[in-house]
Protein backbone atom coordinates (compact mmCIF):
# COMPACT_ATOMS: atom_id res chain seq x y z
CA UNK A 1 0.00 0.00 0.00
CA UNK A 2 1.21 3.47 -0.87
CA UNK A 3 1.77 5.49 2.28
CA UNK A 4 4.45 7.68 3.80
CA UNK A 5 6.07 4.77 5.68
CA UNK A 6 6.45 2.51 2.64
CA UNK A 7 7.71 5.44 0.60
CA UNK A 8 10.29 6.39 3.23
CA UNK A 9 11.86 2.91 3.27
CA UNK A 10 12.36 3.09 -0.50
CA UNK A 11 13.53 6.70 -0.46
CA UNK A 12 16.18 5.89 2.16
CA UNK A 13 17.71 2.99 0.21
CA UNK A 14 21.28 3.58 -0.92
CA UNK A 15 23.87 1.29 -2.56
CA UNK A 16 26.92 1.41 -4.80
CA UNK A 17 24.99 -0.40 -7.54
CA UNK A 18 22.38 0.64 -10.12
CA UNK A 19 18.75 0.63 -8.99
CA UNK A 20 15.94 -0.19 -11.41
CA UNK A 21 12.67 1.71 -10.92
CA UNK A 22 9.75 0.38 -12.96
CA UNK A 23 6.15 1.59 -13.09
CA UNK A 24 3.56 -0.52 -14.94
CA UNK A 25 -0.03 0.51 -15.59
CA UNK A 26 -2.21 -2.60 -15.08
CA UNK A 27 -5.64 -1.04 -15.64
CA UNK A 28 -8.19 -3.59 -16.94
CA UNK A 29 -9.18 -1.04 -19.61
CA UNK A 30 -5.72 -1.47 -21.18
CA UNK A 31 -6.08 -5.24 -21.52
CA UNK A 32 -5.62 -8.45 -19.58
CA UNK A 33 -2.55 -9.75 -17.71
CA UNK A 34 -0.99 -11.10 -20.90
CA UNK A 35 -1.30 -7.69 -22.57
CA UNK A 36 0.41 -6.07 -19.60
CA UNK A 37 3.18 -8.72 -19.65
CA UNK A 38 3.84 -7.92 -23.33
CA UNK A 39 4.28 -4.23 -22.52
CA UNK A 40 6.52 -5.22 -19.63
CA UNK A 41 8.74 -7.36 -21.87
CA UNK A 42 9.08 -4.45 -24.29
CA UNK A 43 10.09 -2.16 -21.42
CA UNK A 44 12.71 -4.64 -20.21
CA UNK A 45 14.24 -5.23 -23.67
CA UNK A 46 16.70 -2.38 -23.40
CA UNK A 47 17.60 -3.01 -19.75
CA UNK A 48 21.33 -3.95 -19.70
CA UNK A 49 21.03 -5.88 -16.41
CA UNK A 50 20.19 -9.57 -16.84
CA UNK A 51 19.76 -10.29 -13.12
CA UNK A 52 17.32 -7.42 -12.74
CA UNK A 53 15.31 -8.56 -15.76
CA UNK A 54 15.06 -12.06 -14.29
CA UNK A 55 13.99 -10.80 -10.84
CA UNK A 56 11.33 -8.49 -12.26
CA UNK A 57 9.95 -11.14 -14.62
CA UNK A 58 9.83 -13.67 -11.77
CA UNK A 59 7.92 -11.20 -9.63
CA UNK A 60 5.24 -10.62 -12.26
CA UNK A 61 5.04 -14.33 -13.08
CA UNK A 62 4.65 -15.63 -9.52
CA UNK A 63 4.02 -12.87 -6.96
CA UNK A 64 1.96 -10.08 -8.49
CA UNK A 65 -1.80 -10.80 -8.51
CA UNK A 66 -2.77 -8.18 -11.17
CA UNK A 67 -5.60 -6.90 -8.97
CA UNK A 68 -4.49 -3.26 -8.80
CA UNK A 69 -4.52 -0.51 -11.42
CA UNK A 70 -0.73 -0.07 -11.43
CA UNK A 71 2.39 -1.21 -9.61
CA UNK A 72 5.76 0.33 -8.80
CA UNK A 73 8.79 -1.99 -8.57
CA UNK A 74 12.28 -1.16 -7.27
CA UNK A 75 15.14 -3.62 -7.63
CA UNK A 76 18.87 -3.77 -6.94
CA UNK A 77 19.99 -7.41 -7.16
CA UNK A 78 23.60 -6.96 -5.97
CA UNK A 79 22.33 -5.34 -2.75
CA UNK A 80 19.49 -7.88 -2.40
CA UNK A 81 16.96 -5.05 -2.51
CA UNK A 82 13.48 -5.56 -3.98
CA UNK A 83 10.36 -3.60 -3.11
CA UNK A 84 7.00 -3.19 -4.82
CA UNK A 85 3.92 -1.07 -4.14
CA UNK A 86 0.53 -1.98 -5.69
CA UNK A 87 -1.46 1.12 -6.61
CA UNK A 88 -5.21 1.71 -6.82
CA UNK A 89 -4.43 4.67 -9.08
CA UNK A 90 -3.33 4.30 -12.73
CA UNK A 91 0.11 5.60 -13.63
CA UNK A 92 2.13 5.84 -16.85
CA UNK A 93 4.55 3.06 -17.82
CA UNK A 94 8.06 4.12 -16.89
CA UNK A 95 11.48 2.55 -16.33
CA UNK A 96 14.72 4.11 -15.13
CA UNK A 97 18.18 3.03 -13.98
CA UNK A 98 19.85 5.34 -11.46
CA UNK A 99 21.83 5.38 -8.24
CA UNK A 100 18.63 5.84 -6.21
CA UNK A 101 15.01 4.66 -6.57
CA UNK A 102 12.89 7.04 -8.66
CA UNK A 103 9.96 7.88 -6.39
CA UNK A 104 8.83 11.25 -7.75
CA UNK A 105 5.73 9.71 -9.44
CA UNK A 106 4.67 8.21 -6.10
CA UNK A 107 5.26 11.47 -4.24
CA UNK A 108 3.11 13.25 -6.85
CA UNK A 109 0.32 10.73 -6.31
CA UNK A 110 0.40 11.21 -2.57
CA UNK A 111 0.25 14.96 -3.04
CA UNK A 112 -2.82 14.70 -5.32
CA UNK A 113 -4.78 12.25 -3.13
CA UNK A 114 -3.76 13.07 0.43
CA UNK A 115 -6.13 14.42 3.12
CA UNK A 116 -8.63 15.00 0.31
CA UNK A 117 -12.39 15.25 0.79
CA UNK A 118 -14.77 14.85 -2.18
CA UNK A 119 -18.47 15.74 -2.17
CA UNK A 120 -20.75 14.43 -4.93
CA UNK A 121 -23.92 16.50 -4.54
CA UNK A 122 -27.40 16.89 -6.01
CA UNK A 123 -30.57 18.63 -4.79
CA UNK A 124 -31.58 15.79 -2.49
CA UNK A 125 -28.39 14.39 -1.02
CA UNK A 126 -24.66 13.82 -1.24
CA UNK A 127 -21.97 11.16 -1.25
CA UNK A 128 -18.78 12.04 0.61
CA UNK A 129 -15.36 10.44 0.16
CA UNK A 130 -12.18 10.73 2.22
CA UNK A 131 -8.86 9.92 0.53
CA UNK A 132 -5.53 9.67 2.29
CA UNK A 133 -2.13 8.34 1.21
CA UNK A 134 -3.55 7.52 -2.22
CA UNK A 135 -6.38 5.31 -0.90
CA UNK A 136 -10.07 5.86 -0.17
CA UNK A 137 -10.34 5.58 3.62
CA UNK A 138 -14.03 6.22 4.16
CA UNK A 139 -17.25 7.16 2.41
CA UNK A 140 -20.57 8.35 3.81
CA UNK A 141 -23.88 9.55 2.42
CA UNK A 142 -26.69 11.88 3.37
CA UNK A 143 -30.24 12.00 1.95
CA UNK A 144 -32.77 14.80 2.49
CA UNK A 145 -36.36 15.39 1.43
CA UNK A 146 -37.48 13.97 -1.91
CA UNK A 147 -37.58 16.54 -4.69
CA UNK A 148 -40.41 16.36 -7.24
CA UNK A 149 -40.00 18.87 -10.04
CA UNK A 150 -43.26 20.71 -10.73
CA UNK A 151 -44.22 21.52 -14.31
CA UNK A 152 -45.26 25.10 -15.04
CA UNK A 153 -48.91 25.63 -16.00
CA UNK A 154 -49.65 26.04 -19.72
CA UNK A 155 -51.40 29.07 -21.20
CA UNK A 156 -54.68 27.13 -21.14
CA UNK A 157 -54.46 26.27 -17.43
CA UNK A 158 -56.95 27.80 -15.06
CA UNK A 159 -55.83 30.49 -12.67
CA UNK A 160 -56.19 28.10 -9.75
CA UNK A 161 -53.96 25.50 -11.37
CA UNK A 162 -51.35 28.10 -12.25
CA UNK A 163 -51.37 29.28 -8.67
CA UNK A 164 -51.07 25.72 -7.43
CA UNK A 165 -48.17 25.14 -9.75
CA UNK A 166 -46.41 28.25 -8.46
CA UNK A 167 -47.00 27.18 -4.87
CA UNK A 168 -45.71 23.70 -5.69
CA UNK A 169 -42.58 25.13 -7.30
CA UNK A 170 -42.02 27.35 -4.26
CA UNK A 171 -42.36 24.36 -1.94
CA UNK A 172 -39.88 22.34 -3.97
CA UNK A 173 -37.41 25.26 -3.94
CA UNK A 174 -37.71 25.44 -0.16
CA UNK A 175 -37.03 21.69 0.08
CA UNK A 176 -33.93 22.07 -2.08
CA UNK A 177 -32.73 24.88 0.17
CA UNK A 178 -33.25 22.78 3.31
CA UNK A 179 -31.51 19.80 1.73
CA UNK A 180 -28.48 21.84 0.70
CA UNK A 181 -28.19 23.38 4.17
CA UNK A 182 -28.28 19.90 5.69
CA UNK A 183 -25.69 18.68 3.17
CA UNK A 184 -23.37 21.60 3.98
CA UNK A 185 -23.63 20.92 7.72
CA UNK A 186 -23.01 17.20 7.20
CA UNK A 187 -20.08 17.86 4.84
CA UNK A 188 -18.35 20.30 7.19
CA UNK A 189 -18.68 17.84 10.07
CA UNK A 190 -17.17 15.14 7.80
CA UNK A 191 -14.30 17.46 6.79
CA UNK A 192 -13.47 18.33 10.39
CA UNK A 193 -13.62 14.72 11.56
CA UNK A 194 -11.05 13.67 8.97
CA UNK A 195 -8.88 16.80 9.12
CA UNK A 196 -9.39 17.45 5.41
CA UNK A 197 -6.89 19.88 3.85
CA UNK A 198 -8.20 19.81 0.25
CA UNK A 199 -11.78 19.59 -1.06
CA UNK A 200 -13.27 18.77 -4.46
CA UNK A 201 -16.97 19.20 -5.26
CA UNK A 202 -18.76 17.25 -8.00
CA UNK A 203 -22.25 17.36 -9.49
CA UNK A 204 -24.08 19.81 -11.77
CA UNK A 205 -22.72 23.35 -12.11
CA UNK A 206 -25.69 24.78 -10.18
CA UNK A 207 -25.47 22.32 -7.30
CA UNK A 208 -21.70 22.77 -7.07
CA UNK A 209 -22.07 26.55 -6.91
CA UNK A 210 -24.78 26.45 -4.26
CA UNK A 211 -22.85 24.05 -2.05
CA UNK A 212 -19.55 25.90 -2.42
CA UNK A 213 -21.07 29.33 -1.78
CA UNK A 214 -22.80 28.05 1.34
CA UNK A 215 -19.67 26.59 2.91
CA UNK A 216 -17.94 28.52 5.66
CA UNK A 217 -14.86 30.51 4.59
CA UNK A 218 -12.70 27.91 6.33
CA UNK A 219 -13.78 25.25 3.87
CA UNK A 220 -14.33 27.47 0.82
CA UNK A 221 -10.61 28.22 0.96
CA UNK A 222 -9.84 24.48 0.82
CA UNK A 223 -11.73 23.82 -2.42
CA UNK A 224 -9.09 22.91 -5.03
CA UNK A 225 -11.31 21.72 -7.87
CA UNK A 226 -14.80 20.94 -9.16
CA UNK A 227 -16.09 18.60 -11.85
CA UNK A 228 -19.37 17.41 -13.39
CA UNK A 229 -20.47 13.91 -12.38
CA UNK A 230 -23.63 11.87 -11.88
CA UNK A 231 -24.66 10.75 -8.41
CA UNK A 232 -24.62 7.16 -9.70
CA UNK A 233 -20.92 7.31 -10.62
CA UNK A 234 -18.77 4.44 -9.39
CA UNK A 235 -15.90 4.89 -6.97
CA UNK A 236 -13.48 4.21 -9.87
CA UNK A 237 -15.13 6.99 -11.92
CA UNK A 238 -14.75 9.45 -9.03
CA UNK A 239 -11.09 8.55 -8.45
CA UNK A 240 -10.27 8.81 -12.16
CA UNK A 241 -11.83 12.27 -12.35
CA UNK A 242 -10.03 13.41 -9.19
CA UNK A 243 -6.70 12.58 -10.81
CA UNK A 244 -7.63 14.35 -14.05
CA UNK A 245 -8.62 17.51 -12.17
CA UNK A 246 -5.50 17.27 -9.98
CA UNK A 247 -3.25 17.25 -13.08
CA UNK A 248 -4.81 20.41 -14.52
CA UNK A 249 -2.66 23.56 -14.12
Image (spheres, rainbow, N blue to C red):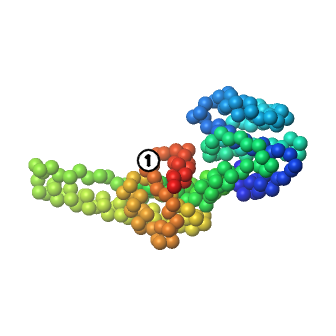
Task: Report which quarter residue 169 is drawn in.
Answer: bottom left
Please tell me which residue lies in front, 9 or 18.
18
Say whether residue 111 is visible.
yes
Q: Residue 191: image x %, image y %?
A: 55, 65
Left or right for 221, reference 37:
left
Left or right for 48, reference 164:
right
Q: What residue lies at 45% left-to-right and 48% top-to-bottom? A: 229
Q: Residue 145: image x %, image y %?
A: 38, 58
Question: How many C-alpha atoms fall within 10 Å of the one at disc 1: few (<14), some, or many (≥20)?
Answer: some
Left or right for 168, reference 129:
left
Single out the residue that lies furthest toward the bottom: 217
Task: Report which quarter residue 81 is drawn in.
Answer: top right
Q: What residue lies at 51% left-to-right and 60% top-to-bottom? A: 224
Q: Compared to 222, does 151 lie above or below? A: above
Please tell me which residue lies in front, 178 or 98.
98
Labels in figure, total: 1
Q: Secondary structure at mark 1?
A: loop
Say whether residue 126 is visible.
no
Q: What residue lies at 16% left-to-right and 54% top-to-bottom? A: 161
Please tell me which residue lies in front, 245 or 119.
245
Q: Residue 116: image x %, image y %?
A: 58, 59
Q: Compared to 216, does 240 lie above or below? A: above
Q: Residue 236: image x %, image y %?
A: 56, 44
Q: Mark 1 sits on what residue?
A: 230
Please tell me which residue lies in front, 211 or 155.
211
Q: What residue lies at 52% left-to-right and 65% top-to-bottom? A: 222
Amino acid sequence: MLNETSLRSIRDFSADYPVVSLYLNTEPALGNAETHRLRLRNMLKELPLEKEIHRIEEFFAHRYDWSGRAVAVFSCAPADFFEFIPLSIPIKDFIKIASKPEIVPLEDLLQDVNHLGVVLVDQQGARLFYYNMGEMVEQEGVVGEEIKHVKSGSSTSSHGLRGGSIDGARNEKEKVGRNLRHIREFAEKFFRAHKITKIMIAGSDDNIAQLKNGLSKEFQNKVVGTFSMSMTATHADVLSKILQVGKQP
